[in-house]
């Protein structure tokens, strides 16, 4: 489909955005679609649209409908199978929105929804109620209200700029947002949530990185799902960001049939470390409408964590979390290594299943009483704790 495209055009992020595949007819020229995929695309209606960058489409297996990259971006008819557990707003963000485009759930940090657009749309998107339908970005008036709210709440020290994907905006728009946030004295940290190094690594340009450098301390949380997403282009994009002094973290959603096994997750996490991206969260899939076919039992995530801790570098082990339905925030889950507390000793299990005892500290008040009541022999240590 793109055999006549020049290398210059292919590596131009604006060309990639302009030439995204957004229709059944276009996609049929590249992939051998299944009836389930055709049905899902035809029934998009007002739901999350389909859009795939040429770059990401070039990584997809055209013959295999179970390709882990393909399943993330190509609609299936299962998206239209409604489930009683589906939620339009699975994380309860609407209830924590004091001003438009700002979510304030935790005491010291807020989320700013900079845009409703992404260059490609994950079919399991937790914000599919707003993303991609009539894509708009935060306007001047909304940004002023967001900054006024943050300025009036001095406990807020950490701002996550997300969406949609904020890096889908032009450099000037991104800088307008960052400059406004950085002007608030009590904002210590700014984070950007993005999937651009995965879907469109060409977007990470020297000019973008140079601009981002002006707003340190600045962090980036990148959404990776599968080892096949780590390509030379993605590696280059992450290295440019890291060389720009931007610490990189990865957020991975656990997805049935895509990455729901320990070997895939472990390979992903270890390869992320190689490109200077620190694994941060492993997410249980949210209860967004039409995502039942992506969800795994929580036990799947806990079993994967069991096979990571002790079996790979600690730096490569993320925190497995459930973003609790209704707005309760992230709840960390892990295998149980603490067995019991017996007679002042903690009974613990290690990653091999071996049992160990760790003595709890003696109450310092009891030690002082003992010292007052007992005289130590001359020359003996002043204190012996048993």
Image (tube, rainbow, N blue to C red):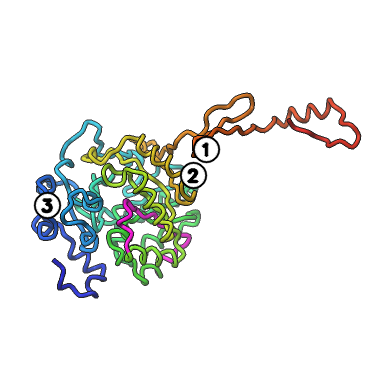
Q: Report, in whole angstroms, how far the alpha carbon at label 1 lies from the one at label 2.
A: 8 Å
Q: Quadrant of the C terminus?
A: top right
- For mark 3, what is the residue? 33
Disc 1 versus disc 3: distance between alpha carbons?
47 Å
| Label 3: which secondary element | loop
Is tag 2's residue or tag 3's residue first in the polypeptide sequence? 3
**Nearer-N-terminus badge (1/2):** 2
Region of the chain picked out in magenta, as a range: 211-231
Q: Residue furthest right?
A: 378
Q: Which residue is mark 2?
A: 310
The answer to which quarter of the image holds residue 372 is top right
Q: Residues within 10 Å of mark 1 (few under 14, many from 20)?
A: few
Q: Is residue 224 magenta?
A: yes
Rendering coords of residue 57 (x, y %): 21, 59
Is the residue 381 above or below the residue 221 in the image? above
Mark 1 near mark 2, Cβ–Cβ under 8 Å? Answer: yes
1 vs 3, front mark: 1
Label 1: element kind:
loop
Vertical placement of residue 10 versus 313, above or below: below
């Amino acid at each position: 489909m793109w055999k006549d495209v020049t290398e210059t055009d292919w590596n131009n992020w604006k060309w990639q955005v302009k030439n995204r595949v957004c229709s059944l007819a276009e996609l049929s020229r590249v992939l051998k679609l299944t009836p389930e995929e055709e049905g899902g695309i035809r029934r998009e209606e007002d739901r999350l649209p389909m859009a795939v960058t040429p770059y990401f489409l070039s990584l997809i297996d055209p013959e295999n409908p179970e390709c882990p990259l393909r399943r993330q971006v190509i609609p299936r008819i299962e998206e239209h199978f409604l489930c009683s557990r589906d939620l339009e707003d699975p994380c309860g963000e609407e209830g924590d929105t004091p001003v438009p485009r700002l979510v304030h759930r935790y005491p010291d940090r807020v989320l700013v929804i900079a845009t409703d657009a992404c260059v490609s749309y994950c079919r399991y998107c937790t914000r599919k109620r707003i993303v991609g339908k009539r894509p708009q970005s935060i306007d001047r008036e909304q940004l002023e209200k967001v900054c006024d709210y943050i300025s009036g709440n001095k406990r807020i020290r950490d701002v996550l700029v997300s969406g949609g994907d904020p890096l889908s905006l032009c450099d000037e728009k991104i800088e307008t947002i960052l400059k406004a946030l950085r002007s608030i004295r009590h904002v210590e940290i700014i984070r950007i949530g993005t999937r651009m190094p995965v879907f469109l690594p060409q977007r990470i340009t020297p000019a973008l990185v140079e601009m981002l450098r002006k707003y340190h301390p600045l962090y980036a949380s990148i959404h990776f799902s599968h080892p096949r997403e780590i390509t030379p282009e993605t590696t280059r994009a992450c290295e440019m960001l890291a060389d720009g002094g931007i610490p990189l973290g990865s957020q991975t959603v656990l997805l049935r049939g895509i990455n729901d096994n320990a070997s895939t997750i472990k390979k992903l996490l270890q390869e992320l470390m190689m490109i200077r991206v620190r694994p941060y969260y492993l997410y249980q899939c949210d209860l967004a409408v039409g995502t039942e076919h992506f969800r795994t039992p929580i036990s799947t995530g806990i079993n994967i964590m069991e096979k990571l801790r002790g079996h790979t570098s600690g730096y490569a082990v993320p925190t497995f979390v459930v973003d609790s339905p209704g707005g309760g925030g992230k709840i960390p889950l892990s295998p149980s290594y603490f067995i019991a507390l017996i007679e002042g000793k903690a009974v613990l299990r290690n990653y091999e299943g071996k049992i160990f005892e760790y003595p709890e500290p003696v109450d310092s008040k009891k030690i002082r009483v003992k010292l007052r009541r007992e005289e130590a022999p001359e020359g003996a240590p002043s204190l012996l704790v048993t």
